[in-house]
């Protein structure tokens, strides 16, 4: 298979085919496309500097089955790329090391230039870097190798924003309902809330945080328990939006107005839920898209020979809606 | 760059490197990995039959921003592949034709062997096949070219399952609250419900279907309107789970028991919502994963020289939960 075959198939001269494959600017975009397609159809031996031109492919490796994290991160990575000639491809390893190795190998075979590894929670995970001979950045899930770069959500800062907001309303009897204690994110958020309360000399409503699961059902259940334990609770900080949704439902059933009697804050700003809840939820947005963009910026720097190490914690922001807004009467 | 360089870098003989790159079984898996990595690191000219062995890469092109469809379809595609050496990579075009062309070109450059094109709704979309010189299958979104193969959710059959279920309870005054009339899925489901009711000589509760938006907020609002228009309604079929969730909330607020007074059916079986709703929702599961698997099976057949055309409609199934279950008292 030679350049002549490619030129013939594309209906151009050999000189034009060569220019097109070398991405030279004097070839019209339409012609370049046609030549590249012809080359692909003929499996013309690529050679990075010929067919690929300046285009890059980045692999986004995920283990997270629901797409709640991976799609926003993917969109954020792409957003940060703007008009550059880079494509991002998402591969799902389903938490299976064998499948992950296979994906990595296959993508390297296809000459993916770099990887972003997405965790399924904010926990520490084993580094994959020694198996990957191209630059790697970790996002939402911290590599256990300090030589790697990890971009993490700052759970402590997110919880601090929520707590300070509740105290500013002002509320004084703040309870906390969250996910399982095995989750680092749940523990970090609970600890940060506690630090803010301690700093003001306040005690948590209902005592210890109510650890459970990340579901609406748990929110409904735990809210009833919390109000039974401390009927004077005037604010509930929830570990995610689903829990907050269930808390709001339970409060409505108990005849407590949100935010009039009890202000509620969620976590995640999950777009299909938070704004459509009754009332719409004040919540912490981790800005997953922004985290993806930061990871891509770091990966681009590494691809340009400027790798970095360590941990970047992204603080996120508080989105204020009616669940802590002016009290309805 | 020669095979000798690859062998040296991998620390094996040239014969072993050659066998590894040709995917011969007498080479240990660990050695094969090492040689492939070395080849990738050196950008050793690939050649499908050498480095790639039997491994394939399939591109899943999506335009759907939320990941509600794309992730289940991706998982279903992978499920159907089992232990074969195929990787699926997801690329997001964000509805932008330029970005889509760029992704297609880049993936073809990296020798992706086939494409699955995922729509963002069940509507007809322009065929992309003429721009893609490898096999293509469409899923959840019908290609406008009859020569293509499209795997679609069978909205009429899904709605029929829901309607027959409600009538079997038995319920007789069935209302319908759904998404925008501009949505083909919404119209097809409404028409199928109407056919079932007509067949039994029943009239729809509240008259025409209530078209609106795919949100919980709309469900809450429309349920109040429907009950005002027809206080005797004893069942509400909803166009998606979010609407059904809002309907249940509104019914609770109006003092109507679900399912005692009003049975409610949703659509989608969206896992983070349907089972966690109060009460848990009976809903139609389109089986997106199964649709992905069917698409992949069709694509594999096309890759093996047995392409197909036309439309496959996948019926889905009804998942029965408490919102139509034995009436609570």
Image (spheres, coloured by chain):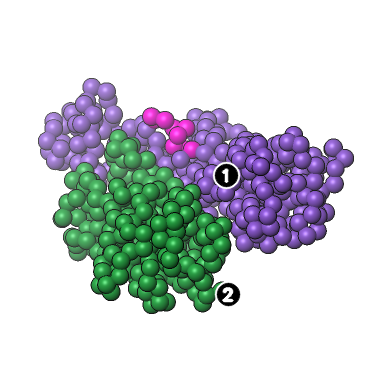
Chain colours: A purple, B green
Q: CA distance from mark 1 to mark 2?
A: 31 Å
Do marks 1 and 2 both belong to one polypeptide chain? no
Q: Which residues are magenta?
A: A76-84
Judged by depth in the image, the label closer to the viewer, 1 or 2, is 2
> Disc 1 marks which residue?
A280
- Give the x, y percent position of residue A284: 63, 41
Q: Does the image show residue A63?
A: no
Q: Tell me the residue at 49%/43% (across/down).
A: A72
Which image quarter: residue B297? bottom left
Magenta residues, dominant SS class: helix
Q: How many marks?
A: 2
Q: Residue B72: within the magenta?
A: no
Q: Is residue B135 something that shows in the picture?
A: yes
* Label 1 chain ID: A
Q: Position of residue B77 (x, y in %)?
A: 38, 60
Q: Residues within 10 Å of mark 1 (few under 14, many from 20)?
A: some
Residue located 76% across and 44% down the image: A193
Q: Which residue is mark 2?
A: B329
């Amino acid at each position: 298979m030679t350049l002549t075959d490619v030129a013939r198939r594309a209906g151009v001269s050999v000189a034009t085919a060569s220019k097109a494959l070398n991405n030279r600017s004097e070839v019209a975009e339409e012609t370049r496309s046609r030549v590249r397609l012809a080359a692909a159809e003929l499996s013309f031996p690529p050679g990075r500097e010929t067919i690929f031109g300046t285009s890059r492919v980045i692999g986004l490796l995920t283990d997270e089955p629901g797409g709640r994290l991976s799609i926003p991160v993917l969109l954020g990575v792409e957003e940060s790329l703007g008009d550059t000639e880079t494509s991002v491809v998402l591969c799902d390893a389903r938490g299976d090391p064998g499948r992950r190795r296979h994906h990595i190998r296959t993508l390297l075979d296809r000459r993916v230039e770099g990887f972003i590894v997405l965790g399924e929670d904010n926990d520490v995970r084993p580094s994959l870097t020694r198996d990957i001979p191209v630059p790697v950045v970790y996002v939402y899930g911290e590599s256990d190798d300090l030589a790697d770069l990890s971009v993490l959500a700052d759970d402590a800062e997110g919880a601090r924003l929520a707590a300070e907001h509740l105290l500013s309303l002002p509320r004084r009897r703040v309870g906390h309902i969250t996910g399982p204690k095995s989750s680092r994110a749940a523990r970090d958020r609970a600890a940060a809330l506690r630090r803010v309360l301690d700093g003001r000399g306040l005690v948590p409503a209902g005592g210890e945080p109510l650890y459970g699961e990340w579901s609406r059902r748990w929110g409904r259940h735990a809210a009833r328990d919390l109000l039974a334990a401390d009927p004077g609770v005037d604010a509930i900080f929830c570990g995610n939006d689903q829990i907050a949704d269930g808390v709001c439902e339970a409060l409505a059933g108990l005849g407590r107005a949100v935010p009039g009697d009890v202000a509620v804050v969620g976590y995640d700003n999950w777009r299909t839920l938070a704004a459509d809840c009754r009332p719409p939820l004040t919540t912490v947005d981790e800005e997953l898209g922004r985290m993806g963009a930061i990871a891509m910026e770091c990966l681009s720097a590494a691809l340009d020979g400027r790798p970095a190490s360590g941990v970047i914690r992204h603080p996120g922001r508080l989105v204020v809606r009616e669940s802590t807004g002016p009290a309805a009467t």
